[in-house]
Image (spheres, rainbow, N blue to C red):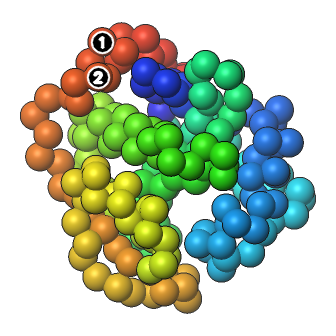
Amino acid sequence: MKLLVTPRLLMRPFAESDLDDLAALYANPFVMRYIGRGTILSRQESLKRLKRMIGDLLADGFGMLAVIERKEKRLVGCCGLRKLDGSQELELGFLFEERSWGKGFATEAAKEVMRYAFSEMKLGKLVALIHPLNLAARRVLEKLGMKYIEQSLFEGIECLKYELSNTFTKPFAYTSKLSSLVFAMK
């Protein structure tokens, strides 16, 4: 997956040097309340997840990316694609630190990942799974044009499934000039 750039964000592959920031993100119970089983992760669990994200990106060519706020040059979250276990579908996912909420970072990052998935990877559709009470994530998905499909269980966890088919004929306006700044990872 390429380095992705938006007006305010840089999305790059995770590195082991991101562990402190990622562990702090995963240790915040308010941030994690709608993620997975709603529990925080220990530093060791964060390291395992970090290594898995790095490995997924190398193995598959796509994955979760570290989201860096360009102005302050700090990690504010993660956004990217992941394979849904037992399915051929790819999920759009995002998670941001609490002090970054309400700034439009999730929408901006997810929009660029979607542009990449549809324009560069030529995917036919993307899905997103969210906790039913995560109203902020629902608003982000709806801003992106994703449509609610169904309520279901995924890995024993109740979630709402959203979907968007690739109907884009040209990249999102603000990414067209910035796309020339991307570099191949491999």
Mark 1 nearby-residue class (10 Å; few <14, some 14–19, many ≥20)? few
State the image coordinates of residue 3 (x, y, percent, origin top left): 51, 24
Q: Nearer the viewer, residue 69 or 184?
A: 69
The residue labelled by disc 2 is 174
At x 30%, y 12%, the residue is 177
**Which quarter of the rendering shows the C terminus?**
top right
Relative vertical location of residue 165 with respect to residue 184 in this rendering, above or below? below
Q: Is residue 64 above or below residue 85?
A: above
**What amino acid does circle 2 point to?**
Tyr
Q: Marks 1 and 2, Cα distance to the nearest angstrom?
A: 7 Å
Q: Position of residue 184 (x, y in %)?
A: 48, 19
Contact check, label 1 and label 2, Cβ < 8 Å: yes
| Residue closest to the eye, 49 or 186 | 49
Residue 75 x/y as whole percent? 69, 34
Amino acid identity at mark 1: Lys
In the picture, residue 15 is in which quadrant? top right
Residue at horizontal 14 percent and vertical 40 percent from the top: 168
Quarter of the rendering containing residue 163: bottom left
**Number of numbered callouts drawn:** 2
Residue at the (45%, 62%) spot, across then down: 136
Considering the numbered disc 2 on the image, is that residue within a helix, a strand or a loop? loop
> In the rendered image, which residue does mark 1 sit on?
177
Give the structural element (helix, strand or loop) at label 1: helix
Where 136 falls versus 33 (above or below)?
above
- Asked if residue 113 can be seen in this view, the reply is no
Q: Is residue 128 left or right of residue 78?
A: left
Residue 78, percent from left and from top:
59, 45
Residue 111, can we see it?
A: yes
